[in-house]
């Protein structure tokens, strides 16, 4: 009887587990030829290697040419196209025009190959999860996978070649569906995990990895590749060039844009949208490669290289709100560090930049020990600005690299854009117009993604001024970027953001926009080509009038 009186063990209540993501069905495998991999690796290394500071590494992209065999994709070659922004490749009309030309060349070969996908690099040594699809990448890939369900997106980080989890520094992806709308893509900017699912709903899988294999190389290909690398290294030539890189820079004409729209075999890839998504106004997308021409520091008297003095005075004393600084890492706040930060704000407002910088360095040491990333980003951002306004452009460039890293970790588009903007400003102070132009272009991409239109407008305006201040002014490109600046300024009036400088939220931006429009119209008179005059007039006419 005593055995029957034993106390029964109490059952633990069942713990409900988060639902596991349903793995999508993976069709076939991707076989990448050694020749295609060689092209991807060498071109990515050209813009991201140990001889270039990591903050200057750039994404590159290209197209994959191959065939379909049942459910398998056979990639025969990879064609590099151009370099993009530091962290994002965004397709524009000039890129689609090249795609149309390339597709026509492939068709003439009549060997049953076609554009079966695209590749791009994510060079980010300090980020262990750099090989993924961003929301912009997802939007780009819709144009490939929409017409071809087996189309692939290949991502490569040349700094991850020896990582176990990423053989060859490569991952290949497909989307789970191709009907994403713009609202979803905008949400994914902050909600998408590197694994391909969303943070808000882990069972919502946006993209997934596809197994791949590098085929070859043959002894003959290896020998030829080695000889080619040695020969080009001796000559000082790039190991690999982009498609039509040696062609003269040609403005994208309306006829070529029309041709790009008529792509047949790439289909959706050729749907060229030359309207700004925020405002709907038409503009000409400049080819990123044209920014590689180094302008002169000479300044024509009519259009200074710098922004108006009134804007810069506001920029110098601009500080972010204490509330925004305090809104993150609340459990890690310390009274001493918080008071130091407030003191630094006061010194910056008084233009005592070196005093502010000294305090901020002490404040940063406290929060870095606590790993308070939110507050660290705010501190480094202001430290970068203080160094710049104090004239320490070398330190500003170093700090911009750290700000960009923290911006990516905290997913803050304002800091990401600001890091790139002040990098561009610092290069400009050095007289390095080429890198300044690219940095401002990179900043625009980040600011637009975060809807910081006033800051995007200022960067576009800086690029316009650089084009005009070249030894031989490129008036057409100056007008094009002025038009983009005006478009962003108009969007800023409709959608003001508290983090942007005060000049973006009062009558100044309206007055400045009206003056800038007059200057842009005045530049049209300097054009000699009648066709270009007509194009530039149409460009400005499409903008909404300034009140």
Image: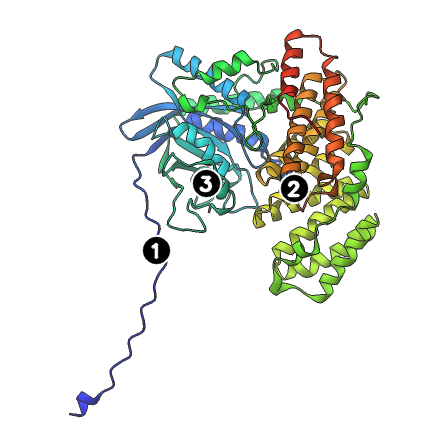
Q: Earlier in the sequence, mark 3 or mark 1?
A: 1
**Residue 80 percent across, percent down from the top left:** 50, 24
Which residue lies under the disc numbered 3?
184
* Mark in the foreground, 3 or 2: 2
Disc 2: which residue: 496
**Judging from the image, what secondary structure is the residue with disc 2 in?**
loop
Reply above or below: 544 against 21.
Answer: above
Q: Is residue 133 visible?
A: no
> Where in the figure is residue 451, as x and y percent of width and height?
60, 39
Secondary structure under tag 1 reads: loop
Left or right: residue 266 versus residue 359 is left
Residue at the limit of the structure toward the left, as seen here: 1
Q: Colour scheme of this structure image? A: rainbow
Cα separation between marks 3 and 2: 23 Å
Q: Which residue is mark 1?
A: 19
Foreground mark, 1 or 2? 2
Give the x, y percent position of residue 437.
Answer: 68, 29
Q: Are marks 3 and 1 in contact (CB under 8 Å)?
A: no
Residue 18, quarter of picture: bottom left
Q: Residue furthest bottom?
A: 2
């Amino acid at each position: 009887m005593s055995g029957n009186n034993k106390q029964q063990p109490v059952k633990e209540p069942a713990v409900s587990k988060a639902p596991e993501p349903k793995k999508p069905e993976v069709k076939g495998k991707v076989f990448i030829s050694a020749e295609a991999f060689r092209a991807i690796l060498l071109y990515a290394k050209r813009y991201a290697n140990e001889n270039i500071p990591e903050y200057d590494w750039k994404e590159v992209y290209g197209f994959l040419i191959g065939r379909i065999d049942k459910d398998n994709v056979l990639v025969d070659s990879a064609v590099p196209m151009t370099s993009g922004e530091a962290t994002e490749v965004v397709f524009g009309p000039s890129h689609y025009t090249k795609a149309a030309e390339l597709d026509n060349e492939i068709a003439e070969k009549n060997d049953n190959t076609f554009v079966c996908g695209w590749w791009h690099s994510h060079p980010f040594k300090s980020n262990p999860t750099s090989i993924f699809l961003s929301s912009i990448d997802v939007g780009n890939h819709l144009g490939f996978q929409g017409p071809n369900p087996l189309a692939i997106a290949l991502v490569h980080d040349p700094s991850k070649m020896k990582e176990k989890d990423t053989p060859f520094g490569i991952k290949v992806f497909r989307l789970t569906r191709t009907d994403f709308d713009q609202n979803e893509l905008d949400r994914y900017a902050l909600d998408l995990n590197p694994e391909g699912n969303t943070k808000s709903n882990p069972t919502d899988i946006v993209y997934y990895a596809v197994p791949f294999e590098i085929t070859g190389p043959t002894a003959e290909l290896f020998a030829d590749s080695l000889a080619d690398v040695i020969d080009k290294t001796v000559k000082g030539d790039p190991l690999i060039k982009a498609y039509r890189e040696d062609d003269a820079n040609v403005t994208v004409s309306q006829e070529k844009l029309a041709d790009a729209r008529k792509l047949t075999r790439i289909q959706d890839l050729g749907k060229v949208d030359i309207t700004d998504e925020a405002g709907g106004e038409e503009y000409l997308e400049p080819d990123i490669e044209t920014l590689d021409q180094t302008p002169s520091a000479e300044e024509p008297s009519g259009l200074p290289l710098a922004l108006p003095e009134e804007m810069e005075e506001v920029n110098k004393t601009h500080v972010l709100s204490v509330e925004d600084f305090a809104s993150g890492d609340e459990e890690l706040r310390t009274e001493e560090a918080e008071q130091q930060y407030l003191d630094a704000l006061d010194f910056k407002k008084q233009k005592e930049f070196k005093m502010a910088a000294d305090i901020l360095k002490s404040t940063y040491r406290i929060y870095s020990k606590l790993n308070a990333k939110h507050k660290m980003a705010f501190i480094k951002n202001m430290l970068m600005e203080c160094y710049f306004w104090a004239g320490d452009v070398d330190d500003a460039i170093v700090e911009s690299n750290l700000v960009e890293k923290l911006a990516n970790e905290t997913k803050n588009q304002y800091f990401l854009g600001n890091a790139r903007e002040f990098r561009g400003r610092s290069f400009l102070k050095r007289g390095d117009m080429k890198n300044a132009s690219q940095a401002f272009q990179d900043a625009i991409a980040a600011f637009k993604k975060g809807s910081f239109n006033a800051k995007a407008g200022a960067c576009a305006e800086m690029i316009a001024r650089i084009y005009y201040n070249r030894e031989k002014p490129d008036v057409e490109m100056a007008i094009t970027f002025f038009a983009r600046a005006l478009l962003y300024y108009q969007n800023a009036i409709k959608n003001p953001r508290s983090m942007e400088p005060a000049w973006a939220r009062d009558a100044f931006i309206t007055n400045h926009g009206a003056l800038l429009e007059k200057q842009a119209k005045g530049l049209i008179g300097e054009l000699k080509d009648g066709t270009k005059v007509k194009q530039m007039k149409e460009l400005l006419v499409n903008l909404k009038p300034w009140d």
